[in-house]
Image (spheres, rainbow, N blue to C red):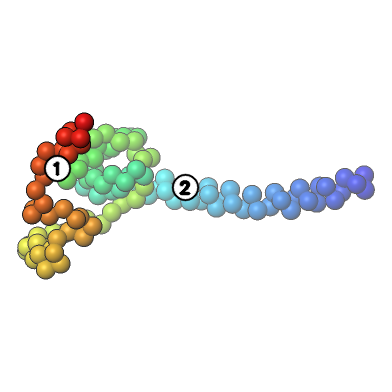
């Protein structure tokens, strides 16, 4: 019996953090479920896979999301990770972006310019 007591004590000490973590995880899952239940038609959301869309129709466990180009897709309600604040487009922002790119010399990270002529594939000539 004396050799069993230290083993039980070690086991109890190792199990306490697991119990605390599982309670925290359950609370987070309940909070996420409440968030998803509150979402309705007209809310802009992001899914766990990174898809942004607008809820245009809602059923019990399925929502229809519309993308920016008008495509409609069916998603499980649990796939929604968060609500997103819609970004209002400001008139002239496209013109400002174009002028910024002209000043900086193009899109950052893109090295191909209009001056580079792309001819035939040179690998074909080497064969």
Q: Which residue does the image show at 28% across and 44% down from the upper left?
A: 51
User: Taking the image as drawn, is residue 99 in sight?
Assistant: yes
Please provide percent x and percent y for residue 113.
Answer: 12, 55
Please provide percent x and percent y for residue 2.
Answer: 93, 48
The image quadrant that residue 62 belongs to is top left
Question: On the rendered image, what quadrant is the N terminus found in?
Answer: top right
116 to the left or right of 127: left
User: Taking the image as drawn, is residue 71 in sight?
Assistant: no
Task: Tally the numbered discs.
Answer: 2
Residue 99 lies, with reference to residue 78, above or below; the image says below
The image quadrant that residue 89 belongs to is bottom left
Mark 1, residue position: 69
Q: Which residue does the image show at 38% across and 40% down from the upper left?
A: 78
Q: Which residue does the image show at 80% across and 51% down from the upper left?
A: 9
120 to the left or right of 40: left
Mark 2, residue position: 30
Please provide percent x and percent y for residue 10.
Answer: 78, 51
Residue occupying the far top of the picture? 127
Q: CA distance from mark 1 to mark 2?
A: 33 Å
Instruction: Kindly identify which numbered label has been placed on residue 49.
Output: none
Q: Nearer the viewer, residue 92 or 44?
A: 92
């Amino acid at each position: 019996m004396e050799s069993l007591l230290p083993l039980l004590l070690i086991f109890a000490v190792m199990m306490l953090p697991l119990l605390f973590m599982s309670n925290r995880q359950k609370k987070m899952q309940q909070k996420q479920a409440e968030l998803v239940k509150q979402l309705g038609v007209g809310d802009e959301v992001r899914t766990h896979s990174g898809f942004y869309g607008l809820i245009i129709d809602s059923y019990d466990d399925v929502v229809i999301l519309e993308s920016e180009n008008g495509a409609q897709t069916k998603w499980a309600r649990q796939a929604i990770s968060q609500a997103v604040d819609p970004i209002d487009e400001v008139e002239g922002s496209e013109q400002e972006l174009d002028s910024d790119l002209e000043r900086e010399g193009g899109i950052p990270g893109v090295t191909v310019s209009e001056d580079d002529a792309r001819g035939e594939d040179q690998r074909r000539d080497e064969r």
